[in-house]
Image (cartoon, coloured by chain):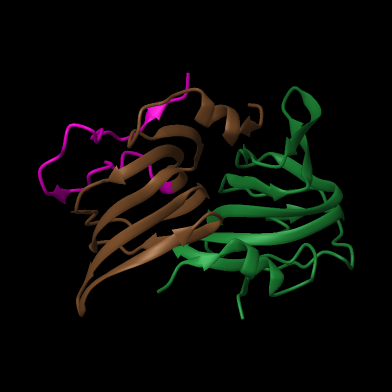
Chain colours: A brown, B green
Amino acid sequence: MEPISLEAALASFSQQWSPRIVTAVNDYDVRVAKVEGEHLWHAHAHTDEFFLVLSGELHIGLREPDGERTVILPRGSVFTVPRGIEHKPYAPVPTEILLFEPTGTLTVGDRHEEVPDHVDATTGHTLT
Amino acid sequence: MEPISLEAALASFSQQWSPRIVTAVNDYDVRVAKVEGEHLWHAHAHTDEFFLVLSGELHIGLREPDGERTVILPRGSVFTVPRGIEHKPYAPVPTEILLFEPTGTLTVGDRHEEVPDHVDATTGHTLT
């Protein structure tokens, strides 16, 4: 096992909304993704989901018990979406993110609206 | 819960080798730390440990079954130390790192050499 450059990892693919697994930590994955535009409303019933913005800017719509709001993550900021909370990521510009979540977590969650063509419903791809 | 700027989190303290918990993901912590100079040889018997270098450069000495080596992590690179592997972080310049590990993981592991005064043996401090 050798260190992995996130820049090199991100340069190795171009598909958006299609995370690559850079390393595992016990039964969790560290994934990176390129994103732009809208993801979809979805929720993970059994796990929190961690976001770190490496470049660009990520907005995350949240449907919380007391209403809907959007959090804005500039480059270098982090946010954890709590389990069970419906959320919808959106990137106004080309954006790179790092995710930390249990291995096997599906990008579209356990319940979700219809998956648009530009979103990859996956548990993450291996880096090549 | 609001997004957290890693830059602001890192600006809120100055102690080295003394991680701050920025957020939790299920029963894992995301921690940030400022480091420079030598940590100590230690091992976590029951967990992997993830490192991301936010600034500076981190070296990690590893005592693997087939010998000792050092991996070098420039800014923007990641590495997971497998559970049970003795390791010793070292930063040749002032360096900022992000860590993912189970909540309650001790900075000096379950077995370690004598803890020097400049190293904080902690499970991570709350951001203030």
- Identify the residue shown where x is 52% and y is 63%: B103
**So how many labels did they put on this image?**
0
Q: What secondary structure prevails in the magenta region? A: loop
Residue found at the far left of this picture: A114
Say if A37 sits above or below B10 in the image. Answer: above
- Is B126 situated left or right of A124 in this image? right
- Identify the residue shown where x is 49% and y is 60%: A78
Say if B52 sits above or below A117 in the image. Answer: below
> Which image quarter is the N terminus of chain A in?
top right
Position of residue B106 measured from the top left corner of the image (x, y, whole percent): 65, 62
Position of residue A35 measured from the top left corner of the image (x, y, whole percent): 37, 40
- Identify the residue shown where x is 11% and y is 48%: A113
- Is B57 situated left or right of B124 in this image? right
- Identify the residue shown where x is 75% and y is 60%: B34
- Is B6 situated left or right of A128 in this image? right
Residue B28 is at least partly visible in this image:
no
The picture quadrant where one finds residue A19 is top left
Q: Nearer the viewer, residue B116 or B58?
A: B58
Q: Nearer the viewer, residue B41 or A58?
A: A58
Q: Nearer the viewer, residue B114 or B61?
A: B61
Residue A39 is at least partly visible in this image:
yes
Is A112 within the magenta? Answer: yes
Query: In this picture, which residue range is highlighted in magenta?
Result: A100-128
Residue found at the far top of this picture: A128
Is B114 within the magenta? Answer: no
Say if B15 sits above or below A113 in the image. Answer: below
Position of residue A84 measured from the top left corner of the image (x, y, whole percent): 23, 62
Position of residue A126 measured from the top left corner of the image (x, y, whole percent): 42, 25
